[in-house]
Image (tube, coloured by chain):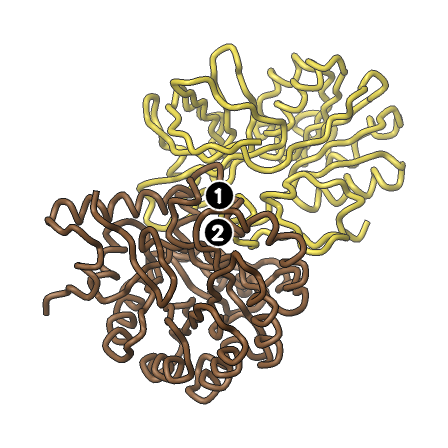
Chain colours: A brown, B yellow
Amino acid sequence: MADLSVNIGNLKLCNPVMTASGTFGYGKEFEDFVDLKSIGGIIVKGTTLHHREGNPYPRMAETPMGMLNAVGLQNKGVDYFVEHIYPQIKDINTNMIVNVSGSAIEDYVKTAEIINELDKIPAIELNISCPNVKQGGMAFGVSTCGCSEVVKAVRNVYKKTLIVKLSPNVTDITEIARAAEAAGADSVSLINTLLGMAIDAEKRRPLLSTITGGMSGAAVKPIALRMVWQVVKAVNIPVIGLGGIMNWKDAVEFLLAGASAIQIGTANFIDPAITVKVSEGINNYLERHGFSSVKEIIGALEV
Amino acid sequence: MKKYILDLVVTQNIQLHANYVLIKLTHVNPLPEMLPGQFAEIRIDGSNTTFLRRPISINYVDKANNEVWFLVQLVGDGTRKLATVNQGDVINVVMPLGNGFTIPQSIATMKPLLVGGGVGTAPMLMLGAELVKRGCQPTFLLGARSSKDLLQLEHFEKLGDVYTTTEDGSMGERGYVTQHSILNTNQFNMIYTCGPKPMMVSVARYAKAHEINCEVSLENMMACGVGACLCCVENTNEGHLCVCKEGPVFNIKKLLWQI
């Protein structure tokens, strides 16, 4: 058995496999299928300061080798999370990370402050890249100033590991990554969903209530991989790679491109036990190639 | 209820009609407990356009043969691919999912009417069988476009009285289920329904007008099937709820339908 442990700032992960926000609920939804402690980190559903009902149905459209979603950050707000959800998940023996979303800087800051007080939450992932919320969300993630402003403000109040989740819907993702790093992020994760659209030609109507939505799934992997490769070269903080990872081989590709850890998102819908299969697959790959630690393959792409 | 990821083996794939197949599956171990109204997320391999699993309601559980049945309507590429499976093929299934229909503890005084339309008749077979097992006499009201679209009648007839409607009048009364004369008898005190949404809305309207308790089974488009992605939500008096987890069965009192 190879050593699969990796570090993201001060965060120690038993293996580099994490779950992407919004695709794994609060972890409990998948406990019948996988041993949750065998996952390196679980990033729970996007949490906002106030309750959000999200967008109207329909919120999902299947596309070739992928899907679009327009959930719109449905969640019951951070107070509900602290009171009702945290007690249920705090004893899950892995890194339980909260994805913090918002539409105004004060909201991000207040939410992060509240989560900072929770002992068993060792990190947050700051979502400045949700394409499905009208005000803000992605607005902070598409300009270096917006990114810098929100990350600085949260950094002032949040004392643990701060991961910033980046949007691919930008001209140059490396600029945004550098702005996040300069503003105090401990790590960046990428990519969030790509803005997309689907139409029902027969009905001459969009398939999503919001017309456009976030694309994910196998189809986005080459774009995600390219962006991870570019960002790894641009920053000195650890990069978490995600976007279309469907199996262990995809995960290894992201590690070779320089990601220190990976997240599995949409693939959880297709195989609810995919996370453990990916970490087993990474281990087999390492053994087959004579590596004793996964750290040896991070950024080991030969060009 | 514990959920499982299972590799099930096809024992039979019966073409019931140009647009419907009945797939019977078994497992080397005893199948898990399943409730009427629950569903499975079925993985479909070998279709270029089918990325997500397909939610299919559980049609019937044949305990004696350790079989679970799925009635599949051929709608798009995914279900068409699924319909081509052969005896001995392995299908990956996540189940049982969702809540299932509510069956009261004391059902001696219960007079249930089970209303199914099109492929929505599928869960009514398992529900009917369960009601019979619990000592209750279900009545079925099944509707379809034409007589050839009325499926599994021989199974329903073994469980209770069956009334039918067809839009073309080729079997039973002509018209929609909610126009059937059996509804004038006012003998029912519980209605379960599954079918096209306009049909369920009409059934719900009838139930509300006659103050009859009524549950409907929804089939909103879903991805994960376990309440994680929040894609399949239905707007209710408790806000957006996941059809895959808090449903697919809802009491009509909970829904915000205009009835």
Q: Residue A142 carries which label?
A: none
Position of residue A54 measured from the top left corner of the image (x, y, whole percent) = 62, 64
Of A214 and A3, nearer the camera is A3
Q: Residues within 10 Å of mark 1 (few under 14, many from 20)?
A: some
- Verify CB contact (< 8 Å) between mark 1 and mark 2: yes
Place residue A1 in its image quadrant.
Answer: top left
Q: Is residue B186 above or below residue A270?
A: above
Can residue B220 be seen from the camera position used here? yes
Name the chain letter of the residue that bears numbered label 1.
A
| The C terminus of chain A - image quarter | bottom left
Position of residue A196 measured from the top left corner of the image (x, y, whole percent) = 44, 69
Of A228 and A168, nearer the camera is A228
Q: Is residue A49 above or below residue B38?
A: below
Q: Residue at x 27, y 65 (%)?
A: A259
What is the three-letter code of the residue carrying label 2? Phe
Position of residue B109 measured from the top left corner of the image (x, y, whole percent) = 86, 19
- Circle 1 residue: A30
Of A122 and A68, nearer the camera is A122
- Circle 2 residue: A24
Task: Check disc 2 and report its element: helix, strand or loop.
Answer: loop
What is the three-letter code of the residue carrying label 1? Phe
Task: Check disc 1 and report its element: helix, strand or loop.
Answer: helix
Can residue B77 be seen from the camera position used here? no
Circle count? 2
Of A288 and B214, nearer the camera is A288
Name the chain letter of the residue that bears numbered label 2.
A
